[in-house]
Image (tube, rainbow, N blue to C red):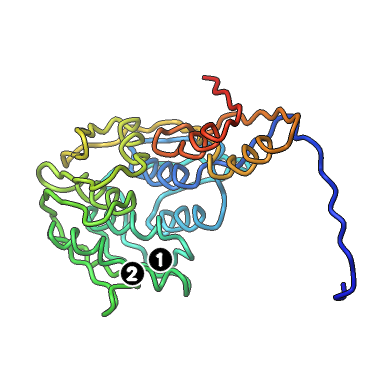
Amino acid sequence: MTATDTLVVHPGGCLEGSVVVPGDKSISHRAVMFSALADGISDISDCLMGEDVVSTINAFRHMGVQIDQVAETRLRVLGVGVDGLKSPPSTLYLGNSGTSMRLLAGLLAGAGIRATLTGDASLSKRPMRRVSEPLTMMGAGIETSADGTPPVTLNGQVPLTAIDYDLPVASAQVKSAVLLAGLFAAGRTSVHEPAPTRDHTERMLRAFNVDVEVSAATVSIVGGQRLRPVDVVVPSDISSAAFFMLGASIAAGSQLRLPAVGMNPTRTGVIEILRAMSANIRQEN
């Protein structure tokens, strides 16, 4: 193509039919983690098998958890219980997955696992003190680089003690890391949020039979609980569905169905915005 070439763009018409978008990444991460900690076998359907979630899967495999991919988006996880993880024989490389690193930091600190968590060049620049500081307050042996970035090193120091923690910045990842450490800590761990964040961790832990209390902006968990195995169907990611919702909203005559989209109230802002702009969106179930 040269500077003198001309591009002609014609309207593409309307969008019709049904589109199944990929599974929610945040829920896929947590489904793998909680299934690995459960006392038995869990099946995960419609799991997003992108690089970030695969990093989480491989991390648990290195810690002695058998995870079988029985179909393209279906996993079978043989949970080892909250006391069954083993320290990995080598560094856990997590690619570009900040969710993997932050949630695993809390989980492994509580479980007494000795491990070093690393990632790619981008992840290696992400701030990790916001996780390491509350975990240190709980008694965990955790270190970052001098500037607070990965690698994150855990020395297996346990037991942890519950804390009452005010999040300085709203973050679902940091909240989840502290709650997962609190799952192993002595006493009641409470996290206070300055603003609402996605609550996948709280909802999913309840599904795995863990008692999680939510009161206004505070989430609390008592240590020593065990997880029961649960079969999880991962909903489609509303972030991926947003592109199709927008396209169908602006292309006249469109009628598009997006089945099985996750409708967590903390994630539905795109629907509220499109409706405020007169989009005709109907929810079923």
Give percent across and percent down for residue 219. Answer: 21, 39
| Label 1: few (<14), some (14–19) or many (≥20) C-alpha neighbours in 10 Å | many
**Residue 80 in view of the camera:** no
Give percent across and percent down for residue 50. Answer: 56, 53
Along the line of sight, the residue nearer the viewer: 102 or 73 = 102
Along the line of sight, the residue nearer the viewer: 192 or 36 = 192
Q: Is residue 102 above or below residue 145?
A: above
Q: Would residue 170 be found to the left or right of residue 2 on screen?
A: left
Q: CA distance from mark 1 to mark 2?
A: 6 Å
Q: Which residue is mark 1?
A: 92
Q: Would residue 179 be found to the left or right of residue 172 on screen?
A: left
Residue at the top extreme of this rendering: 285
User: What residue is shown at x 38% (from left), y 42% (from top)?
Assistant: 79
Q: Quadrant of residue 131?
A: bottom left
User: What residue is shown at x 57% (from left), y 49% (from top)?
Assistant: 49
Q: Would residue 16 be found to the left or right of residue 278 on screen?
A: right
